[in-house]
Image (spheres, rainbow, N blue to C red):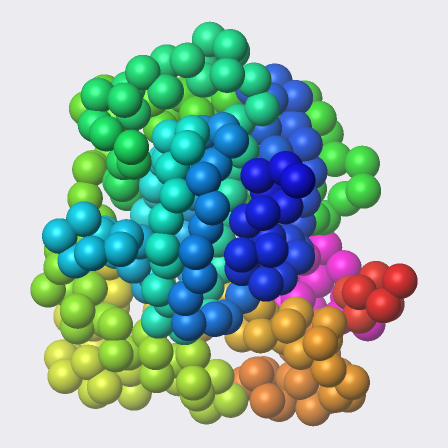
Amino acid sequence: METWDRVSSALGVRPVVSAELAGVPLRAERYIFQLSQCEVPPLDSMVLACHLGGSRATVGRTRARSFDFIPSSTAVFQPGFASHWVFAGAIDMAMFHFLDAGHEMVRKLQRLLAERGKSALFADPLVNASAAQLLGEVARSPSPDRGFLDRVGALMIEQACRVLEGTAGRHAPPDALQLGRMHAVLDWIADNLSNELSNAELAERAGVSESHFRRVFLEAMGMTPHRYVLRLRLERVHELLTRTSFSIARIAAQCGFNSQSHMTSCFAAAYGITPARARQQARL
């Protein structure tokens, strides 16, 4: 069984996107799931994981040797790394398995990682955006532009190397106090997607002014509250489309969209297909 198959088995779900990329040879997978905890077995190869959205995860078996994996953060793991994960809720995660340990850029990344230990955690907008772009391109088309994918994949790895070298990014997630303030709000958003979820309402939940909330949220999450809420809503739409027989109109209302047509246009913009088509594909 390949490493990515063991990861999928540990998470209890199949990836919503899965593809092999050339250039820097990678196995790219995207998971959207919700569970309390899992054990990830030792990895056969180096793996880069990006938190694309959702709740916090804690990686490690003891408090002293664990770290929080939060939205917009990236973690790189050495071959042989085994881990215990605890999840605070639903999560959207990208995982890139390096298929050629002899590739020049892979050797460089692994050397930089070895200087830090078995894993490294950092937050870099370009790495995270590249990961999302790669998976979005693969999801949108059955025949994506392979040359473009190769270039974006190489950029993602090069930027990860620059971060570990200390020439870009930052080696810690955003301020812990801000994240603590956000955590309860993020959980409340995930549990109340059918509500309006205005900035004013969310700021009140966080106990700060609306302008301060927007600034803190953007710094902590790397996106505006509106964009974050929309992404969670669309992820919930995708989950309900593929796992339930609810009508599309019911799903739109349950996920906080003011109409089925509004949901359809937002979903098509994000996934490249209509909700009805996504449901059909899931049932093939």
Residue 275 lies within the magenta run: yes
Q: Quadrant of the C terminus?
A: bottom right
Q: Which residue occupies the extreme left position in the image?
A: 177
In the rendered structure, which segment of residues is drawn in magenta? Answer: 265-276
Q: Is residue 254 above or below residue 186?
A: below
Viewer-nearest residue: 260 or 33: 33
Q: Quadrant of residue 127?
A: top left
Viewer-nearest residue: 256 or 116: 116
Viewer-nearest residue: 238 or 217: 238
Q: Is residue 262 above or below residue 160?
A: below
Q: Quadrant of residue 217?
A: bottom left
- x, y percent for residue 245: 78, 85
Q: Which residue occupies the extreme right position in the image?
A: 284
Q: Quadrant of the N terminus?
A: top right
- x, y percent for residue 234: 58, 70
Is most of the magenta stretch helix, strand or loop? helix
- x, y percent for residue 97: 53, 33
- x, y percent for residue 89: 41, 73
